[in-house]
Image (cartoon, rainbow, N blue to C red):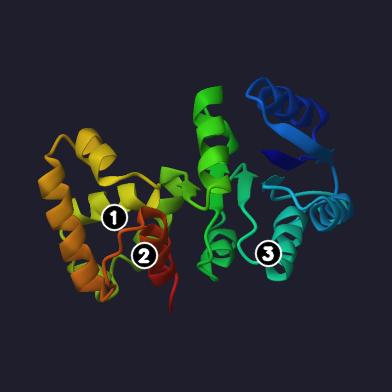
Amino acid sequence: MRVVVAEDLFLLRDGLVRMLEAYDFEVAAAVESGPELSKALAELEPDVAVVDVRLPPSFSDEGLQCALAARRTRPGLPVLVLSQHVEQLYARELLADGSGGIGYLLKDRVFDADQFVDAVRRVAAGGTAMDPQVISQLLDRRAQDQPLGRLTPRELEVLEQMAQGRSNVAIASRLHVTERAVAKHTSNIFGKLGLPPSDDNNRRVLAVLAYLDRG
């Protein structure tokens, strides 16, 4: 699996490269600026991009804007964003097209290599890997709105777990309930949100997140 890494801090960039290579990823390029990232994404067509939000020369949202531009050229290009903070605007931009392959992790909440590598693989496969704090803020932003406000506390918990890319089996394990109970909550959630159920968990999560971003 070919990866492009964009991170301006040398030690972190080098650490990401070494970790990915240790897990048998091919790092096609490791760049430190927005222009370099744009060029690498256009010329190398990686399977997934791991992108810091703030890159030179602007040190604002350079990395994300480059990734979003590349996704417009190549819809569905898998992008895993790394950030120091929860940037709701950035998360909403990523979710806007609903084409899959998106992730948003907070750097100081990635606690081990397996967690990170799993997120990279999940995003590369077209799924989602969203930090719980990102999801919580998106949910909080809409919590008083209808019809999201009609969800029960347990349904909101299930929705948050779904948004992190977890299957019904995984959700049941984390919430200490049966898989049948999760399936029932999931059905209720889609009914209240006006979204048709889907057998594809990743697409289902993207649909929910896209809905949460509306308005």
**Are the residues at dot 1 and dot 2 in contact (C-beta closer than 8 Å)?**
yes
- The residue positioned 76% from the left and 34% from the top of the image is 27
Secondary element type, mark 2:
helix
Asked if 104 appears above or below 112 in the picture, the reply is: below
Q: Is residue 98 visible?
A: yes
Using the image as rendered, state which of residue 108 and residue 181 is in the foreground: 181
Question: Which sits earlier in the primary sequence, circle 1 or circle 2?
Answer: 1
Q: Which of the labelled discs sits on residue 215, or is there none?
A: none
Is the N terminus in the top left, top right, bottom left or bottom right quadrant? Answer: top right
Q: Tell me where residue 151 appears, x and y as whole percent.
A: 19, 64
Spatial CA span between label 2 and label 3: 20 Å
Is the C terminus in the top left, top right, bottom left or bottom right quadrant? Answer: bottom left
Are there few (<14), some (14-19), or many (20+) residues within 10 Å of tag 2? many
Q: Tell me where residue 164 appears, x and y as whole percent.
A: 40, 47
Q: Label 3, on which residue? A: 71
> Mark 1 or mark 3, which is nearer to you?
3
Q: Is residue 153 visible?
A: no
Using the image as rendered, state which of residue 191 and residue 46 is in the foreground: 46
Are there few (<14), some (14-19), or many (20+) residues within 10 Å of tag 3? some
- The residue positioned 20% from the left and 72% from the top of the image is 192
Q: Which of the labelled discs sits on residue 159, or is there none?
A: 1
Q: Amino acid at mark 1?
A: Leu
Q: Amino acid at mark 3?
A: Arg
Asked if 94 appears above or below 147 in the picture, the reply is: above
Number of dots carrying numbers: 3
- Indicate the quadrant where residue 189 lies: bottom left
Spatial CA span between label 1 and label 2: 8 Å
Q: Label 2, on which residue? A: 208
Secondary element type, mark 3:
helix
Q: Tell me where residue 14 appears, x and y as whole percent.
A: 78, 26
> Mark 2 or mark 3, which is nearer to you?
3
- Indicate the quadrant where residue 29 lies: top right
